[in-house]
Image (cartoon, rainbow, N blue to C red):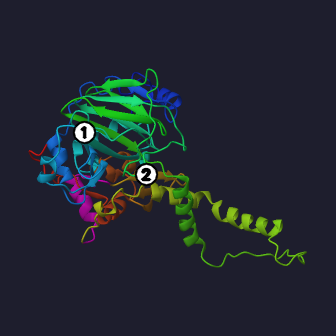
Amino acid sequence: MTSANTPRTLLGGLTPAQFLSQHWQKSPLLIRGALPDLVSPLEPDDLAGLACEEGIEARLVEEHGPEKPWQVSHGPFDDATFSRLPSSGWSLLVQAVDHYVPEVAELLEAFDFVPSWRLDDVMVSYAPPGGSVGAHVDQYDVFLLQASGKRRWQLGGSPGDQAQLIAGIDLRILEDFSVEAGQEWVLEPGDMLYLPPGVAHHGISESDDCMTFSIGFRAPSADEIVTGFADYIGEQLGDDRRYGDADLQPPLHVGELDDQAIARVRELLLDAIDRPEQMAQWFGRAMTQPKYLDQVVPAESATAPSALRASLERGDRLSRSPGSRFAWRRQDESQAILFVDGDAILCDPELARYLAAETCIDAGVLDYPESERVLAALVDSGSLSSADEEDEVSGSGEIL
């Protein structure tokens, strides 16, 4: 991992510390030549092939659709869908391409200045000239990396919660969008634009082979956090903790909810949620939940730790299954919690740190205490698998 004080080309010559303090969740940043030698690991036909696969989240956005303006269709698609499309005015978007194309996943290694559990996925969009999804606002951080072709980006400030949206369509497109002075650029391969949450933006393809990689980050809403933690803590509390009023006095008015009653409820709630370690347990599980639960498939039979050790000692390796997520939290000097795909495992802190940082695991992991037990559990849960199994992108072909 590069030092926080080492300038990076990816960040336009800023150090990670400078970028985080000056721009992260604060202001946009245009980075020319962020990845100057970038050659797209994906061709447009590969993306179309993925969009034809069952189980892959893909959308087709047509500004002038056959049924209505800004029509959105969901995959899987077929050859007939692509053959009827016009020469301009549409976009194909495929989510989580990093789960299916290892070379796309490798790009995420350059973003290690943000905690890995904050990363969501890499969405890839393709558009012919004039293709767009309209002016809109995202509620999460995103890096827009131009992989091939050219795209014009326009920024329109931060409209806030009161922004008016075009009614009667399936997209959250801004009704009023005006470009701020000096906030318009054409990005070429290797260029990148960082946008914090809430910034209105509009991207329009200016070439035949325009492909943009959107590196997005997880940002659960307050509603998701409150309801998620409430459900989790409710399961821990059970039914024995109840509203009580041992200090009850005769009421002045029998039907009144007085301040004392509300204070008792508040005390009960605060006592229930003021549990830092349980909050950490829930948050670690929540932030490592796979984007698609069916991608992490448990093994059909239990793995013997001794057999796993022998396999690694022979030179075999393990790798994370596509879509698996790892994070860790130190408990004390001798123990940590390793969060993996929504579950938690107690283990040695150095082992937890290693597994949360490395995507390919070799025999070196055996130096850590109880590594065989932890690795066997992760193989059984489907979070780790053999690194030597071939990963193929199926369905690619001459479509676009």
Q: Is residue 247 magenta?
A: no
According to the picture, the residue beneath numbered tag 1 turns out to be: 89
According to the picture, the residue beneath numbered tag 2 turns out to be: 327
Contact check, label 1 and label 2, Cβ < 8 Å = no
Report the residue at 30% width, 33% height from top. 204
Q: Quadrant of the N terminus?
A: top left
Picture layout, residue 274 above or below residue 23: below
- 14 relative to 185 in the view: left or right: right
Please identify the residue farthest to the left as the structure is shown: 398
Taking depth in this image into account, of 16 and 350 the one nearest to the observer is 16
Residue 90 spot, x, y in % from top left: 25, 42
Q: Which residues are magenta?
A: 301-323
Camera-side mark, 1 or 2:
1
Residue 390 spot, x, y in % from top left: 15, 52
Question: Real-space Cα distance between discs 1 and 2?
Answer: 41 Å
Report the residue at 31% width, 25% height from top. 186
Q: Quadrant of residue 292?
A: bottom left
Picture layout, residue 128 above or below residue 301: above
- 399 relative to 99 in the view: left or right: left
Secondary structure, mark 1, is loop
Taking depth in this image into account, of 204 and 168 the one nearest to the observer is 168
